[in-house]
Image (tube, grey):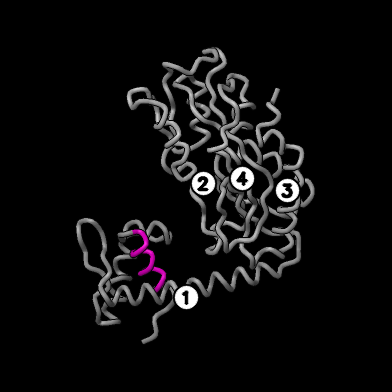
């Protein structure tokens, strides 16, 4: 008996999320419905798809085969959607854009206001996420990323360098020695910024670790300690002061990226052009060459 696509989706969701409760929430159904559907699928196949353990649902060989088939089906469906969206030439519809919190606050929101004034028929869905969303799955159409190594399978352009320097609270003066520090988590910049701090501060001097640059800036501004920040973010805060020149070992780049299948879609192309144009006058500040007054 052929199985519907929704059955494959359920099995893959259980595997991806490690359990039935999480899978049900992801699919927008209740737990009892998911339980009955999974039992019906196993009965129809006359095969057990998961071993139930305290740690979660572990796929059996039959389950692994079905999950692999579901992944191929999902890739085909998403690929078709991308290809279709890439041929759309109307400047209307939904555009999903993702950026980390600091990039969204400092750079993206003002550009979105300009973009909407030019293209009011495009509805923007802004996804603020510190992790890099998967553009191949269309978790987003366009990504604004700070990185030195953009995903090679994506299409886009480098817009500027992003300089980092050491910052502290203006009220605390220029001294660095004997100060507490705030430390970026391992997820920020692949851990490079955290290693910068731990290489200079003893463990007892690290007052706080945080996994977002926005949280890092607010922690420095609150007087929890000194720490590295992007120059545009640190210079733009009236309560902060630079305690160093830009640090070459922490420099990264600002990229705007999309999937190659979407590069010719009218709303994607228009947004990328508007954002790139808006970054031109900000380049010197992004690169730490023009502190904000």
- Residues at circles 3 and 1 in contact by the CB criterion of under 8 Å: no
Q: Nearer the viewer, mark 3 or mark 1?
A: 3
> Regarding mark 3 in the picture, which secondary structure is present there?
helix
- Quadrant in which the N terminus appears: bottom left
Of pointers 3 and 1, the one earlier in the residue sequence: 1
Q: Residues within 10 Å of mark 1 (few under 14, many from 20)?
A: some
> Is 25 drawn above or below residue 223 in the view shown?
below
> Is 167 drawn above or below residue 94 in the view shown?
above
Q: Nearer the viewer, mark 3 or mark 2?
A: 3
Q: Position of residue 141 (x, y in %)?
A: 61, 58
Image mark for residue 129: 2
Report the residue at 63% width, 55% height from top: 257
Q: Nearer the viewer, mark 1 or mark 4?
A: 4
Q: Position of residue 153 (x, y in %)?
A: 57, 64
Q: Position of residue 127 (x, y in %)?
A: 56, 48
Gap between marks 2 and 1 measured at Cα: 27 Å
The residue where tag 3 is placed is 276
> Regarding mark 2 in the picture, which secondary structure is present there?
loop
Q: Residues within 10 Å of mark 3 (few under 14, many from 20)?
A: some
Gap between marks 3 and 4 measured at Cα: 13 Å
Q: Nearer the viewer, mark 3 or mark 4?
A: 4
> Regarding mark 1 in the picture, which secondary structure is present there?
helix
The residue where tag 1 is placed is 73
> Regarding mark 4 in the picture, which secondary structure is present there?
strand
Of pointers 2 and 1, the one earlier in the residue sequence: 1
Part of the protein shown in magenta: 8-17
Residue 178: quadrant of the picture: top left
Of pointers 4 and 2, the one earlier in the residue sequence: 2
């Amino acid at each position: 008996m052929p199985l519907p696509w929704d059955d494959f989706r359920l099995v893959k969701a259980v595997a991806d999320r490690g359990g039935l409760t999480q899978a049900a929430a992801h699919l927008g159904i209740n737990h009892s419905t998911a339980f009955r559907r999974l039992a019906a699928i196993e009965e129809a196949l006359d095969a057990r798809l998961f071993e139930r353990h305290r740690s979660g649902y572990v796929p059996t060989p039959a389950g692994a085969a079905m999950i692999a088939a579901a992944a191929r089906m999902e890739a085909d469906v998403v690929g078709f959607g991308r290809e279709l969206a890439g041929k759309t030439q109307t400047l209307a519809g939904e555009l999903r854009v993702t950026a980390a919190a600091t990039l969204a606050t400092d750079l993206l929101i003002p550009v979105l206001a300009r973009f909407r004034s030019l293209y009011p028929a495009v509805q923007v869905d802004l996804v603020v996420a510190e992790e890099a969303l998967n553009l191949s799955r269309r978790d987003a159409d366009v990504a604004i990323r700070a990185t030195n190594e953009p995903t090679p399978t994506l299409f886009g352009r480098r817009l500027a360098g992003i300089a980092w320097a050491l910052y502290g609270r203006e009220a605390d003066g220029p001294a660095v020695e004997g100060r507490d520090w705030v430390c970026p988590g391992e997820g920020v910049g692949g851990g490079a910024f955290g290693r910068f701090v731990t290489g200079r501060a003893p463990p007892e001097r690290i007052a706080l670790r945080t996994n977002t640059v926005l949280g890092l800036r607010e922690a420095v501004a609150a007087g929890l300690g000194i720490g590295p920040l992007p120059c545009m973010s640190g210079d733009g805060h009236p309560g902060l002061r630079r305690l160093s020149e830009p640090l070459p070992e922490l420099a990264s780049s600002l990229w705007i990226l999309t999937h190659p299948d979407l590069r010719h879609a009218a709303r994607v192309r228009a947004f990328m052009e508007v954002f790139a144009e808006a970054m031109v006058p900000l380049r010197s500040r992004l690169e730490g060459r023009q502190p904000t007054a």
